[in-house]
Amino acid sequence: RVTRVTAGSVRQAVVTAYVRGDVLGLRGSSRSWGRLAGALMNPESQLLAQSAARLINALTAFNAGRSYLASEEVCEVLLQALHVGHLDATTTDMALAALQKLSIRGVVQGALIEGGAVEWLVNTLAEVRTLTPYTQEYASALFMNLTLRSAGRARCHPLAAKLLPALIQLLTSVQTHVVPYVTGALYSLLSHSSLRQEAFTMGLDSTL
């Protein structure tokens, strides 16, 4: 009803109805969100976890869906899903993409930074050659959004030795539509003198 409808106005109406009806059980005494959260964090069924992640990601493509899902509770669950090592790649990608779309909101950025998203992203981007184009794009875009915050940049300082080589590799080896996210993150990070000096040492100026 959301992803297979061609008319944008119909999709918008469906999402608005879902939000008004609290389809995920985020409000009141409903226990449905707790069950979905459990499916994402400790999945007994990969199919249920993947379906839940797909639905959440689909909702975040709409402003009404982002307003509905932009809470610390939801972000904590999605972030935990990224840390769960036994989830299938599609579920992880859907959770990552949903977080990226939610991360345009300040409250979400703060929750993700406090929850260790920066560290997870640096470790993930450092393995760029093993990542799918989808993961590269959404991980880079989410990382850029988090570096807009001083708290996010501060989390990057201790990780410079791993982070900067990863960003250099991303600049030279990924699809061109990912590059603006990488350069956007660098623009924020290089405002700090210590990171800027280390970047010079690694030859980032020549790469750019």
Image (cartoon, rainbow, N blue to C red):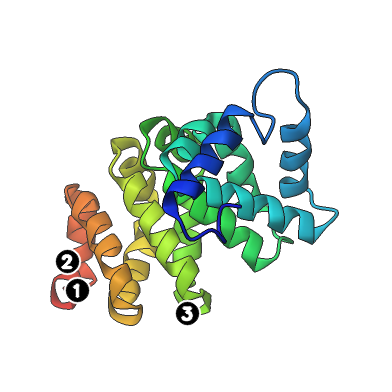
Residue 196 drawn at (x, y percent): 18, 56
Amino acid beneath label 3:
Arg
* Disc 1 target residue: 203
Q: Is residue 140 above or below residue 99?
A: below
The crowd level at tag 3 (other Cα within 10 Å; few <14, some 14-19, many 20+) is few
The local secondary structure at tag 2 comes to helix
The crowd level at tag 2 (other Cα within 10 Å; few <14, some 14-19, many 20+) is few
The residue lying at 41 percent from left, 39 percent from top is: 63
Q: Nearer the viewer, mark 2 or mark 3?
A: 3
Marks 1 & 3, CB-CB < 8 Å contact: no
* Disc 2 target residue: 200
Residue 84 drawn at (x, y percent): 69, 54
* Disc 3 target residue: 129
Residue 66 drawn at (x, y percent): 47, 38
Marks 2 & 3, CB-CB < 8 Å contact: no
Tell me which label, 2 or 3, sits earlier in the chain: 3
The residue lying at 36 percent from left, 42 percent from top is: 104
Alpha-carbon span between mark 2 and mark 1? 5 Å
Amino acid beneath label 2:
Phe
Residue 178 is drawn in which quadrant? bottom left
Amino acid beneath label 1:
Gly
The residue lying at 55 percent from left, 58 percent from top is: 3
- The residue furthest top is 28
